[in-house]
Image: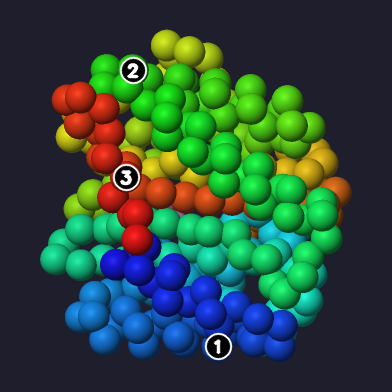
Amino acid sequence: MAADTLVYVEKFVKPGVSLLEIDKIVYDYTLSQNAVPATLGYHGYPKSICTSVNHVVCHGVPDNYLLKEGDIVNIDVTTKFDGFFGDSSKTFAVGKVSESAQKIIDTAKEAMEIGIKAITPYGTTGDIGFEINKFVTRKGYSTVKEIGGHGIGRKFHQDPFVPSFGKKGKGEKLIPFYCLTVEPMINEGTDEILEFPIPGSSHSHYETKDKKLSAQFEHTILITESGYEILTLP
Ligand code: MF3
Ligand code: CO
Ligand code: CO
């Protein structure tokens, strides 16, 4: 459902649409499926999605900002249905974007895919982070260190933390039937980020310190005895 929501929302991501309109579209679509937008009221978070534009790294709160040609926007959808959470995000290009904006989008997507491919049953979270960081830094970008993927299931966020950097064989063991997200955030410039409290919430939103672009993709993955299964493919 989280994956289908991202497919559904794509046609609305155009110059002139407000982040609040996209939030409302996701809210209505989710309720129409008898599901629940998981971020709404989560530790006081006020909206149904996160919308992170340009230099916003993650947890951007939808407001009346109008998307404009050339922006990039990550839309992060978490759906709760039948007691389980599914979490997926994508960075969209708004209209025609610069070559450099398209390049960070493409690299973020590939970084997530490379992270997922590093998953092996009884491997570690460090295997995932190592491959992501190696790929991203070779492309000339940096990875965000403070925030990353997480276990997920009957809870939205649980152990293990899934970093976008690390050492092979280090970190937490990946046990079959763990479910987790791989969601690297990558920055055009410095990996330093600034934290801004979200009023009424124990969560914060984050921005790049140098105001350069940041991009992210996210899937929810099930570890199996023989490998893994991506649960948020549309
Ligand atoms: N969906 C985000 C994640 O990938 C979490 C958003 S929590 C919120 O983990 F409170 F900021 F919405
Ligand atoms: Co997540
Ligand atoms: Co998410």
Please determine whether, in this image, residue 209 is positioned above or below residue 25: above
Amino acid, disc 1: Glu
Give neighbour class at mark 2: few <14, some 14-19, many 20+ (Cα, 10 Å): some
Ligand 1 closer than 8 Å to the CB at disc 1?
no
In the picture, which quadrant includes the C terminus?
A: bottom left
- The residue that label 2 is drawn on is 123
Q: CA distance from mark 2 to mark 1?
A: 42 Å
Give neighbour class at mark 1: few <14, some 14-19, many 20+ (Cα, 10 Å): some
Circle 2: element type: loop
Q: Position of residue 77 (x, y in %)?
A: 43, 65
Amino acid, disc 3: Ile
Q: Position of residue 50 (x, y in %)?
A: 53, 67
Residue in view at x 62 percent, y 45 percent: 108
Q: Residue 230: in sight, yes or no?
A: yes
- Whichever of callouts 3 and 1 sits on the residue coming sooner in the sequence is 1
Circle 1: element type: helix
Ligand 2 closer than 8 Å to the CB at disc 3?
no
Please determine whether, in this image, residue 141 is positioned above or below residue 128: below
Q: Position of residue 182 (x, y in %)?
A: 44, 41
Q: Position of residue 119 (x, y in %)?
A: 37, 26
Which image quadrant is residue 14 in?
bottom right
- Residue found farthest to the top: 169
Circle 3: element type: strand
- The residue that label 1 is drawn on is 21
8 relative position to 10: left or right: left
In the picture, which quadrant includes the N terminus?
A: bottom left
